[in-house]
Image (cartoon, grey):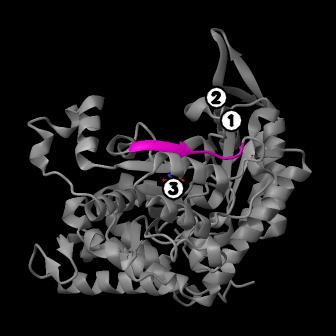
Amino acid sequence: MTADPVTASSAAPGAEYADTASAAYQAALQVIESVEPRIAAATRKELADQRDSLKLIASENYASPAVLLTMGTWLSDKYAEGTIGHRFYAGCQNVDVVESVAAEHARELFGAPYAYAQPHSGIDANLVAFWAILATRVEAPGLAELGAKHVNDLSEADWESLRNKLGNQRLLGMSLDAGGHLTHGFRPNISGKMFHQRSYGTDPETGLLDYDKLAAAAREFKPLILVGGYSAYPRRVNFAKLREIADEVGATLMVDMAHFAGLVAGKVFTGDENPVPFAHVTTTTTHKSLRGPRGGLVLAQPEYSDAVDKGCPMVLGGPLSHVMAAKAVALAEARQPSFQAYAQRVADNAKSLAEGFLNRGARLVTGGTDNHIVLLDVTSFGLTGRQAESALLDAGVVTNRNSIPADPNGAWYTSGIRFGTPALTTRGFGAAEFDRVAELVVDVLNNTQPTQASSGPSKAKYTLADGTAERIHAASAEMLAANPLYPGLTL
Ligand code: DSN
């Protein structure tokens, strides 16, 4: 097995600097402790908690010590609003190098003509993309058009009038309960206010994306922007088809690949499953399956690059130069052959987890997975997602509750639990361990009972049968000990 920068194997890239990294962290924590001991303690405790739990949140991972160390420098102290070679502050020559290297790695890794490394998060990346598309596609009115009101005071009618002034500002994205993201037009999010939004769902029987229905919706709605991508859909998407649909209706195709960027980088998603050649604008985060620092990236075709390049100060505050540096380091890691092996294991492990659930009688949305996500419908256990999430946490299994299509329990309590394999795959878990994880999860859920509150059934309350948490903790501890996290770090 090819090992990873954060695991124990001596073959791991990063193993050669494990002792140095350990010394660096010990020294750093001593310094922090001398100023604010509570922060040093919380940082140490976070490592202990992450070491001792089964981290199955699909959007989380473990960055390498090289990536983490890169974030702790004086690059943080520099203001550098603007873009490479064209800043609003003097003395940005080193930040220019940092941003150029990050963008170069992103272009090379993803085969993109243009890359923008400044977004602080995925939401920021999407806002930059939205604005760049609008700026490129429509004539935006000046701020004076908003009148004297503060933007927070705009009523629905004001937003309507603003959108009308802007011309076609229709956005079609995947609905939240089908697995889309808040920023893909969800009404309470700014994307649902900036745009006339409509969403596409999945087939009610199969849970799969129905491209014919999506094409019909696009023909009827004629969006300016068709958004592809998801945060809870456990299947691959054919982006060539999405581009065909976008072209037919004159839409710009924007793909948010935040969740699966690591599978694109690792060449697991190739051909029609790789969004980058098909999308006009592609956005991502860098900390999920891509395993970098917390942040965002925008990739664009040449016709959108000038507008994307104006992301700061149009949409973004000053760049986080220390994080851009860490993005460069993570992207350099992702260009190594070992990252491709890692990405393949992420997908293989998700299949093993899904099969482990199915073999034990559980129901999965879409009946399985072919990416890094497994979405378990917990209604057959008589539980809400909220109850299942809490019971699993009691047993040291860290997940998040998630809506399922047409969720009877809504977006807060939900009826699903989303699992992801990127983090534990980084630790070294393989197919056998993920099958065991499925067994432990089913054990917990079979031993969790919803509790009736005095005022009626509560969708949050539950009881876990005596001894369950202890049994699961003990079983997990064996697997976790065999696959240690940051083993060179003695903190
Ligand atoms: N919060 C991320 C996730 O968990 O999928 C998406 O932004």
Of pointers 3 and 2, the one earlier in the residue sequence: 3
Label drawn at residue 415: 1
Q: Is residue 22 above or below residue 134?
A: below
Q: Are marks 1 and 2 in contact (CB under 8 Å)?
A: yes
Q: Is residue 362 above or below residue 380?
A: below
SS at circle 3: helix
- Badge 1 amino acid: Ser
Residue 212 in the figure: left or right of residue 491: right
- Badge 2 amino acid: Asn
Residue 71 in the figure: left or right of residue 458: left
Label drawn at residue 250: none
Of pointers 1 and 2, the one earlier in the residue sequence: 2
Does residue 391 appear in the picture of this structure? yes
- Badge 3 amino acid: Lys
> Marks 1 and 2, how far apart in space?
6 Å
Residue identifier under label 2:
409
Q: Is mark 2 within 8 Å of ligand 1?
A: no
Label drawn at residue 45: 3
> Marks 1 and 3, how far apart in space?
31 Å
- Residue 215 at what x, y percent from top left? 59, 54
- Residue 201 on the magenta segment: yes
SS at circle 2: loop
- Residue 344 at what x, y percent from top left? 70, 76
Does residue 7 appear in the picture of this structure? no
Magenta residues? 196-203
The residue nearer to you, when weighing 319 against 467, is: 319
